[in-house]
Amino acid sequence: MDNRLIVEQVKSLIEGTNNNIGALGNVAALLKETFDYYFWVGFYVVRGEELVLGPFQGPVACYSIKKGRGVCGTAWAKAQTLIVPDVHQFPGHIACSSRSNSEIVVPVFRHQEVIAVIDVDSERLDAFHDDRELLEAIAKIIEPLI
């Protein structure tokens, strides 16, 4: 599916809703169903000094992640998108699922502060090549839901 169509569908999923949790759940479902190599898709939201689990699609996940820990916590601390081709080579990787082999984490910003991250895992090694632009666009769209 064309990334522009996905962006438009994300916009339509959140437009006019006051059910932020449901909308984030639908965005996660859209991404997981659209990309067959997305094994886990979800949101972690900043609460104090940790990221807490938000809506997601996939197997069970970690409830919270400390700032600077794992791929999610590192993306938060560095305030930048991280693409990890092999999570088993990432220092301090948090193995919420042993089936995960690669990961992309995209921060969601409000006023230049990270307020959440989009986390996507794949069972494939080096799975994320053309995903950054789309996920960064989605991060901007979903910011009001956080």
Image (tube, rainbow, N blue to C red):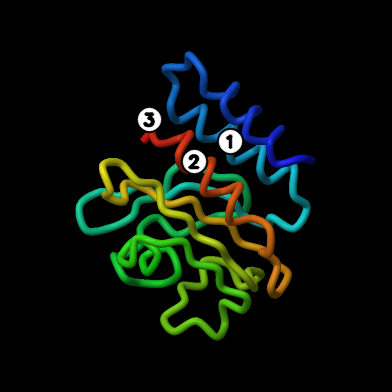
Q: Mark 3 points at which residue?
A: 144
Q: Nearer the viewer, mark 1 or mark 2?
A: 1
Q: Position of residue 115 (x, y in %)?
A: 31, 46
Kindly indicate whether the residue at mark 2 contacts the one at mark 3 (C-beta within 8 angstroms): no
- CA distance separating discs 1 and 2: 9 Å
Which residue shows up at 57% across the image and 82% down it? 88
Residue 36 pos. (x, y %) = 78, 52
Nearer the N terminus, badge 3 or badge 1? 1
Q: Nearer the viewer, mark 3 or mark 2?
A: 3
Discs 3, 1 touching: Cβ within 8 Å: no
User: The disc labelled 1 sits on which kind of residue?
Assistant: Val
Q: Which mark is residue 27?
A: 1
As helix, strand or loop, the secondary structure at mark 1 comes to: helix
Name the residue located 62 percent from the left edge and 70 percent from the top edge: 102
Measure the alpha-carbon separation of dots 3 and 1.
13 Å
Q: In this view, does 56 lie to the left or right of 34?
A: left
Q: Where does the C terminus fall, quadrant-wise?
A: top left
Q: Which amino acid does label 3 sit on?
A: Pro
The percent position of residue 103, horizontal first and vertical second, equals 58, 66
Q: Earlier in the sequence, mark 3 or mark 2?
A: 2
Mark linked to residue 55: 2
Looking at the rendering, which quadrant does residue 128 occupy?
A: bottom right
Determine the CA span between mark 3 and mark 2.
Answer: 15 Å
- The relative height of residue 14 versus residue 79 in the rendered view (above or below) is above
**Few, some or many residues within 10 Å of mark 2 (<14, 14–19, 20+):** some
Q: Secondary structure under badge 3? A: helix
